[in-house]
Image (cartoon, helix red, strand yellow):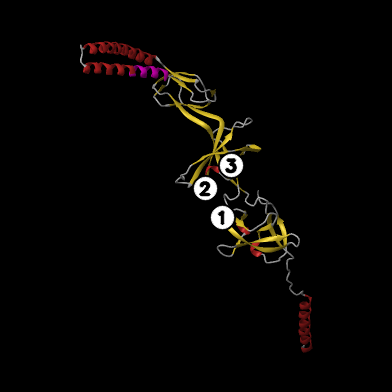
Amino acid sequence: MEPRIISFATLTIALSFFLAACEEPPQTYVASSRPVKTIIIGDNLTGDTRTFPAVVDAIQKAEISFRVSGKVQKISVKEGDEVRKGQILAELDPVDFDIRLKDRQASYKTAKANYDRAKDLVEKGAISRVDHDEIRAKYFTAKANLDAAEQDLLYTKLKANFNGYIAKRHVEKFEEIIASQTIFSLSDVSSLKLKVDIPENLMILIKREGAGVRKLYALFDNISNQQFPLSFMESTTKADPNTKTFKVTFRMDAPEDYNVLPGMTATVYAAVLPGELQPAASVMLPVSAVISDNEKRATVWVVDENTMTVKPRKVTPGTMIGDTMSVEGLQPGERVVIAGAPFLRDDMKVTLLETGEQAK
């Protein structure tokens, strides 16, 4: 039994050495290059485009109302009608106003006759100057009342203040209305206004009256491949207390081929000129492209396309807006790493995953 045991043990040891010899030693694989995403710096180093949601409004609008109270006798237009300045839109029942006018006319005639007699009598000394002045005051009061009655009769006809369209009618025929009650909403859509809210962190960097905007246009979701030029109109100088934004208004010519109306929405695109949102000779880069080393200096990685290696470049950081940052120290045509920068080292070979150009 003993020789068989020794033989089995020897076989076991020999088998262990055989299996160990068959295993491959562990190997370390080193990537030949690091994959990175890049962009190419454009010729316009300060190209920067911002987008803002906008609401369309009429270039001019008004709530039209009668200046006197009464019953609506006639409505001459309907919603959507185009009207001209001075056109009669609606009329009140004039009966009561005619009666008042005739009463004022009678009072005026009596007051005028009394005043004419008083002027002769006071010159002859038949009445005192005090009596004369009292009669004269009644005459002027009667004249003012007559003028008011005549004007009230004219006010029974409601006219358009400017050329435009009836956006909405607020009353019905035969309805009793009071003075200043809105009868029609009148809108002039020969041109349009687009209103956007600008956050304070951008408003503080933009010059007044829209200076510095290179290109300004609007896009509508349902109108494809067409830009509508805009021009600056006005902006508020006080922030909304809730949103901390400033209302900026742009003007847009009404398109001939599309029915763009107040209340619709659009997107405003603003391309900013050099020096408006970032320092001169700077470029906007994703924050992921910039590696900060101190408060005043930062580093980006520039790709040498001849050797496909990267070199660090010291740049000066500027304004950071959202997920982008302006930096100085780059040249047009240079390819900059925007993803994978923290894992790079000097002269490391890289492979381009995705490329693009900086917006101009």
Position of 145 compared to 357: left or right?
left
- Which amino acid type is shown beneath numbered disc 3? Val
Residue bounds of the magenta highlight: 144-155
- Give the spatial CA distance, label 2 vs label 3: 15 Å
Mark 1 crowd level (few <14, some 14–19, many ≥20, 10 Å Cα):
some
Q: Could you tell which of marks 1 and 3 lies nearer the N-terminus?
A: 3
Mark 2 crowd level (few <14, some 14–19, many ≥20, 10 Å Cα):
some
- Give the spatial CA distance, label 1 vs label 3: 21 Å
Q: Residue at x 79, y 75 (%)?
A: 22
User: Which residue is denoted by mark 2 in the rendering?
Assistant: 203
Helix, strand or loop at disc 3? strand
Helix, strand or loop at disc 2? helix
Magenta-highlighted stretch: main secondary structure? helix
Tell me, yes or no, whether the two marked residues, 1 and 3, touch with CB atoms within 8 Å.
no
- Which amino acid type is shown beneath numbered disc 1? Met
Position of 247 compared to 100: left or right?
right
User: Which residue is denoted by mark 1 in the rendering?
Assistant: 320
Q: Compared with residue 178, is residue 292 higher up or lower down, i.e. above or below?
A: below
Q: Residue at x 58, y 41 (%)?
A: 268
Residue 147 on the magenta span: yes
Residue 293, given in percent of the width and then of the height, sits at: 59, 65
User: Which residue is denoted by mark 3 in the rendering?
Assistant: 268
Mark 3 crowd level (few <14, some 14–19, many ≥20, 10 Å Cα):
many
Residue 348, given in percent of the width and then of the height, sits at: 71, 65
Q: Could you tell which of marks 1 and 2 lies nearer the N-terminus?
A: 2
